[in-house]
Image: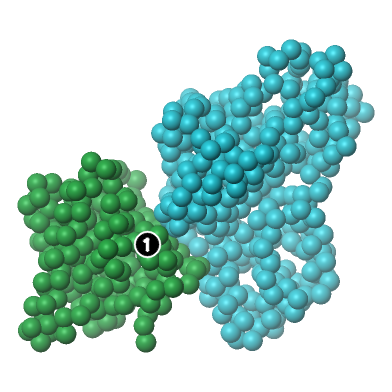
Amino acid sequence: MRQLLTEIRIAGFGGQGVILAAAVIGKAAALFEGGYATMTQSFGPEARGGSSSAQVILSSEPILYPYVAHPDVLVVMSQEAATRFAPELKPGGILITERELVRVDNYPPGVRVYGVPATRLAEELGRKVVLNIVMTGFFGAITGLLEAESLRRAVADSVPPAMQKLNLQAFEKGYEYGSNLMLQMGANGNGNGDPVLALESA
Amino acid sequence: MHADPKGVLTGVHFLDGDHACCEGTLAAGARFSAGYPITPSTEVVERFASRIPTVGGIFIQMEDELAASIAIQGAVWGGAKAFTVTSGPGFSLMMEHLGYAAMTETPCVFVNVQRGGPSTGLPTLPAQADMMQARWGSHGDYGIIALCPNSPQECFDLTVTAFNLAEEFRVPVMMMLDECVGHMTEKVVIPEAERIQVTPRRYTKRQPADFRLYEPLADQVPDMVRAGEGYRFHVTGLTHDDRGYPSMNVETQDRHVRRLQDKLKPLANGRALSETENLEDAEVVVVSYGITSRVAQRALQLARQQGIRAGKFRLISAWPFPEARIAELAGRVKAFVVPELNLGQMVHEVARAAAGKAKVMPVTHAGGGVHPPETILNAIVEAVR
């Protein structure tokens, strides 16, 4: 049976673009795929360097309860976020990490872990700041929750015109890395190479 | 009349409640805001400050909330539609001038994005504990209107409504958001300007010689004038007669203060804004508002699945309180369940209106989060037992 409601948490340091990554995902679902999306966020009093976490719920029905307790998908960009949130994942859920910033060993049974060197890929584009969009592209390829095209439109819609090209490149970097990883895992018998979740559109 | 297209950001957006509220002020025609930014309401004025130069208007970051809440009233008498934005600690400081707006019948909007209190409390977390303060926070007797949106879309829609009601009844209108709704991001559809109704200011058509500043019309509301158009007028917080001059005696006080409450009667019941569901066969009714009404909706679904005849009464206009409607329901239901993010505020109004004819059960929460739906469900189950 296809999933009707998917709960996602994205977490990292303040300044890494956690909220923007969540907004892109929510926007892709709510504006470009006709579904429902609710994003909430929590942050410390600091503007930079503190912890930052956003929650997005995607659904084919109106969303009533706005918070996420046990996400289906967790995206972490800092060790602190991983340590804090990985144990809360739903058993069998998906854990997506910034592979070079995060080491995880404590998560519920059946969780599948996928890593991407997002900071390094962003640096290859000359701007570390787009690591959040690299993560978003990777998220798109791994989860298959949303059409790549909807996510691209949401990226373009969420950044200033002068930054669109760079951000779309960052998205492609992450998406390509994720697609290749899924293919490899399929070839190694670790999976069938298909994206691991599917959201029924409304 | 319809909205001025200059202020209307027509389109489909992904906005949080604070930003949507700001777009509501612009669509409603607000061209002046004064504020002293405070979490979790800052985004409303932050957006206004960046949008207003292109729309044409003024934002002033004031020295404090007292100044902000009176600057907007100067702007209103100068002809602008105006509002201020705050949260708990700032709302407390604004109470003096909220009373001034009520007394002088200055149409304006106060946006309060509620956070946990008392005092500094929980700056980044939700509560609904300013509901009684919104009604009774300033000294003396007066009436106000308070609206409670439960989504970013409603933060837009109801902000427009808030300005319209302020103009129609000449009262300060409170937009009672909570941190959760203010910081929650969802799809927001902003229609074309010609599809947004805005209520123009009720300017008098009389000549200066025939005009009396506080002479009530048939709806108990007086018409206004704009400064600088030849009308001599005097606006004072002292008790004043129909001419607007201080008249401090029992008769004037009685007539004026009663009218400040009575002019809102149509809104108390007939025109009260609410959302109801399954009231026909309900044996228990959940009365809720703001973010809690969404969580309560989930609890209602679960209750119905268990075969409990549970109905919904969502307060959209919490003040004036829809007393007659609750009283009518009290005659035919077993119980009311009233969840709110405080230790019991609107529940007292429900109990007062129910007048002992139905059980009234509060579901309290000190703030900082929302109720788990199961907690409200348990109260529903308990109520019908």
At 31% from the left and 50% from the top, the residue drawn is A158
Report the residue marked by disc 1.
Answer: A32
At 53% from the left and 50% from the top, the residue drawn is B191
Q: Position of residue B40 (x, y in %)?
A: 45, 45
Left or right? Give the position of A37 relative to B323: left
Left or right? Give the position of A4 relative to A117: right
Q: Which amino acid type is marked by label 1?
A: Phe
At 41% from the left and 54% from the top, the residue drawn is B14
Depth check, front residue: A15 or B56 = B56
Depth check, front residue: B233 or B322 = B233
Disc 1: CA contacts within 10 A as few (<14), some (14-19) or many (>=20): some
| Relative vertical location of residue B119 with respect to residue A5 in this rendering, above or below | above
Please identify the quadrant where the C terminus of chain B is shown. bottom right
| Relative vertical location of residue B327 with respect to residue B203 in this rendering, above or below | below
At 79% from the left and 69% from the top, the residue drawn is B329
Please identify the quadrant where the N terminus of chain B is shown. top right
| Relative vertical location of residue A81 with respect to residue B15 in this rendering, above or below | below
On the question of residue B18 being in view, the answer is: no
Question: Which chain's residue wears label 1?
Answer: A
Left or right? Give the position of A88 relative to B123: left
Q: Mark 1 falls on what kind of element?
A: helix
* Residue found at the very far right of the displayed protein: B251
Q: Using the rendered view, name the quadrant where residue B133 is placed.
A: top right
On the question of residue B31 being in view, the answer is: yes
Q: Position of residue A60 (x, y in %)?
A: 44, 73
Q: Which chain shows up in green? A: A
Q: How many marks?
A: 1
Q: Which chain shows up in cyan? A: B
Q: Position of residue A40 (x, y in %)?
A: 40, 58
